[in-house]
Image (spheres, coloured by chain):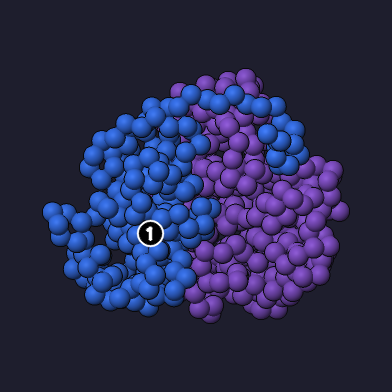
Amino acid sequence: MINFQYARASDIADAVRQHAADPAAKFIAGGTNLIDLMKDDVERPSRLIDISRLPLKTVEETAAGGLRIGALVPNSDLAYHPLVAERYPLLASAILAGASQQLRNMASTGGNLLQRTRCSYFYDIATPCNKRAPGSGCSAIHGLNRMHAILGTSEACIATHPSDMCVALAALDAIVHVTGPDGERTIAFGDLHRLPGETPQRDTNLQPHEIITAIALPAETFNAHYSYLKIRDRLSYAFALVSVAAALTLDGGAIKEARLALGGVAHKPWRNPAAEAALRGKPANGASFKEVAELLLQDAKGFGHNNFKVDLARSAIIRALTQAANETPQSQSDKKIR
Amino acid sequence: MQPSARSTAAAQPAIPAPEKISTVLNVNGVETRLNIAPWTTLLDALRDHLDLTGTKKGCDHGQCGACTVLVDGRRINSCLTLAVMKDGATITTIEGLAKDGVLHPLQQAFIDHDAFQCGYCTPGQICSAAGLMAEGKARTADEIRELMSGNICRCGAYPNIVAAIQQAMGRS
């Protein structure tokens, strides 16, 4: 870790101001990812602006019938919050599928959105990586890429976004509230994270000095038919090989609305609105689910070690949708997949 | 002295060393004032500044749980926590769990169930289990296993660790 200055922000405007005065600074809240990256010299901020004491720690009901989640609500508090557990069990389940309880106690809602890829080459400063050192090349494309993306990749980067919580937030059409030098704005969740393209060093569409202040959830909860299914190398405390957030509303046996987001397969939580639309009006059965899985994965492409992810994702999509339709969501403590 | 390959490769202007920051921590019931650099983790502050070496440094990257302590009653990884950010907080380490010479029920249960071999992960396991009991979310063995998954035991004492936690949960 290199030397850095440390300062506390007194309020949101002060945080933005301090960041604008020192563009090499970073905000710090939970620190679970940033401190780790600093220890490996991947992140080298000149200054840490401590936002952890700002009053952004409440979960409130909105006039629109949804929830507004403060950016500093710890992941564990959010998963166990009664309004989240009851109304948005897909979100609670996804959060509890990620990390460990210690890390969930530390990690903030906003920080979860901004965690960086766990690509081992991104972490290893002795190797080329376009995300860490733009223009240096991608070591993963012809390297050990078992954990890497199969959708939305570019020649510059095949890294995945590591979050579980974000996969559920994508499926739920969350809205991200940010404040920057020009004031406040909102970003649709699907527009927050980017595909790598030629600029994999940019994970998100946040503008310079912007800070996430809250996440809003719409009124549609999908709390009857949902499942978060995460497939990984060990049963707990591991990043996803493939994960699926599935949410349905049903009318009899027919699908009224379907939401489907994938984790572990792309540079951002992966959704395909056309595939979701194709499920509308279809019977909620295995044939429909297989069809949508094929549609979602028609452009999927492996890079050698991760070729298995295409088949794994197909099976996981069908299984998660079946679990959602049957009201038998994946348990995050008893890991048996039913 | 030659600059290291790392600093040369990074080619970033030198940042002046910041002043040490006065930080107050209440550790195991004792209020302690420290002057520490901002990059000092809570783990290093406990071990190197306060000589509380019960808290262990395993991976130093939040992957093993050996450094688990309670901050304001919640279990966290002290290796990924900057001590300056916890100014004013109440910290409980393994050294602070026994009261008046009587072991904490978890400490006694780990002995009763032989819930360790080398013992290196044990302080983190016990602090994590204390946090788990305070959270009150685990009832079954499956739930204990899941919510203790942030604590790795290379000796593989997991069955006995789960049994020890179940014993302590029954008592409290």
Colour given to chain B in the rendered image: blue
Tell me: residue A254, above or below residue A212.
below
What percent of the width, then of the height, locates residue A172?
58, 53
Left or right of A17 in this view: A121: right
Quadrant including the N terminus of chain A: top right
Give the residue displayed 75% in from the left and 69% down from the top. A306
What percent of the width, then of the height, locates residue A310?
75, 71
Tell me: residue B161, above or below residue A101.
below
What percent of the width, then of the height, locates residue A164?
57, 57
What letter labels the chain drawn in purple?
A
Left or right of A88 in this view: B116: left
Instruction: Work out whether residue A301 or residue B146 is closer to the camera in this orientation and state it.
Output: B146
Q: Secondary structure at mark 1?
A: helix
What percent of the width, then of the height, locates residue B160?
34, 76
Q: Which residue is mark 1?
A: B124
Q: Is residue A12 visible?
A: no
Give the residue displayed 52% in from the left and 43% down from the top. A31
Give the residue displayed 60% in from the left and 54% down from the top. A163
Left or right of A270 in this view: A228: left
The quarter of the picture where residue B7 lies is top right
